[in-house]
Image (cartoon, coloured by chain):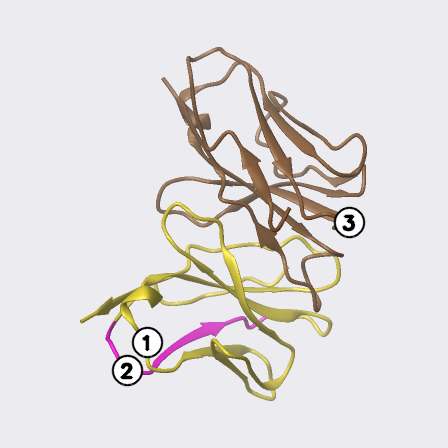
């Protein structure tokens, strides 16, 4: 596709429910990132993949959060036993290489998760 | 990863030039400076990136002094559609991008 696609755009989950958020990166992009953005705050890093390898998961807030990218393309962020504090927008970004030098990261529109 | 400091908010009027300055005193030798723009209900969008001196594209200019401890994003002749949050980030190589709270720019008619 033309850009990074995330689905669903909106998700309402009951507390304790498991959710799965999907990210389709730009074709050919090696790097994939997940961010969490609370209302009025900047995006907070969650995890980073290079192809299928998860190289950094230091930002995952708890062991209820799990991300995978089994074939180096589509990625899924799973949140188990959702809590109200998990309510946020979850952003996915992809880039050809890393996000630092001379690379542009492309973000999806995000998935707004509301836990009730 | 270098921490950045930028104003929380700025106001401007249509047609004016807006300059947003970001300080990054601990920038590393291999770090680049990147600015992103974010509209409500959308993901951040890359605006411009530079290493030193001046970079210009069709959207903005980025001024970086010799010591690289700060940078200034310049938006020429802003319009209402430039109302957004602007983030200044530093990093290099495969570093993850660390976002601060950004600068909320409000453009008035």
Chain to which the residue tagged by mark 3 belongs: A
What is the secondary structure assignment of the residue under circle 2? Answer: loop
Q: Colour of chain B?
A: yellow
State yes or no: residue B16 in magenta. Answer: yes
**Is A64 drawn above or below residue A89 in the view shown?**
above
- Spatial separation of the CA atoms under disc 3 and disc 2: 39 Å
Which residue lies most toward the left here? B109
Which residue is at 33% across, 83% downward? B17
Q: Badges 2 and 1: C-beta atoms under 8 Å apart?
A: yes
**Label at residue A30:** 3
A82 in relation to A96, above or below: above
Secondary structure under badge 3? loop
Q: Which residues are magenta?
A: B12-26
The kind of secondary structure element at disc 1 is loop
Residue for badge 2: B16
What residue do we see at 56% from left, 37% from top?
Answer: A6
- Chain letter, brown: A
Task: Provide the residue designation for mark 1.
Answer: B78
Residue B74 among those drawn in magenta: no
- Give the side of residue A53 with respect to residue B105, left or right: right
């Amino acid at each position: 596709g033309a850009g990074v696609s995330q689905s669903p755009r909106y998700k309402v989950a009951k507390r304790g429910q498991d959710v799965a958020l999907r990210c389709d990166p730009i074709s050919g992009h090696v790097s994939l990132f997940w961010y969490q953005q609370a209302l009025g705050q900047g995006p907070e890093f969650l995890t980073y993949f290079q192809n299928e390898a998860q190289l950094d998961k230091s930002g995952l807030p708890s062991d209820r959060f799990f991300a995978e990218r089994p074939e180096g393309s589509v990625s899924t962020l799973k949140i188990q036993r959702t809590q109200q504090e998990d309510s946020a927008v979850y952003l996915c970004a992809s880039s050809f290489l890393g996000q630092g030098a001379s690379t542009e990261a492309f973000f999806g529109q995000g998935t707004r998760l509301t836990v009730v | 990863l270098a921490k950045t400091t930028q104003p929380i908010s700025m106001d401007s009027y249509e047609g004016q030039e807006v300059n947003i300055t970001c300080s990054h005193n601990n920038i590393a030798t291999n770090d680049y400076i990147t600015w992103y723009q974010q509209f409500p209900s959308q993901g951040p969008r890359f605006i411009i990136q530079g290493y030193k001196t001046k970079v210009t594209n069709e959207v903005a200019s980025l001024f970086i002094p010799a010591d690289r401890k700060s940078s200034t994003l310049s938006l020429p002749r802003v319009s209402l559609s430039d109302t957004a949050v602007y983030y200044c980030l530093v990093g290099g190589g495969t570093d993850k991008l660390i976002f601060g709270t950004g600068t909320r720019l409000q453009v008035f008619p």
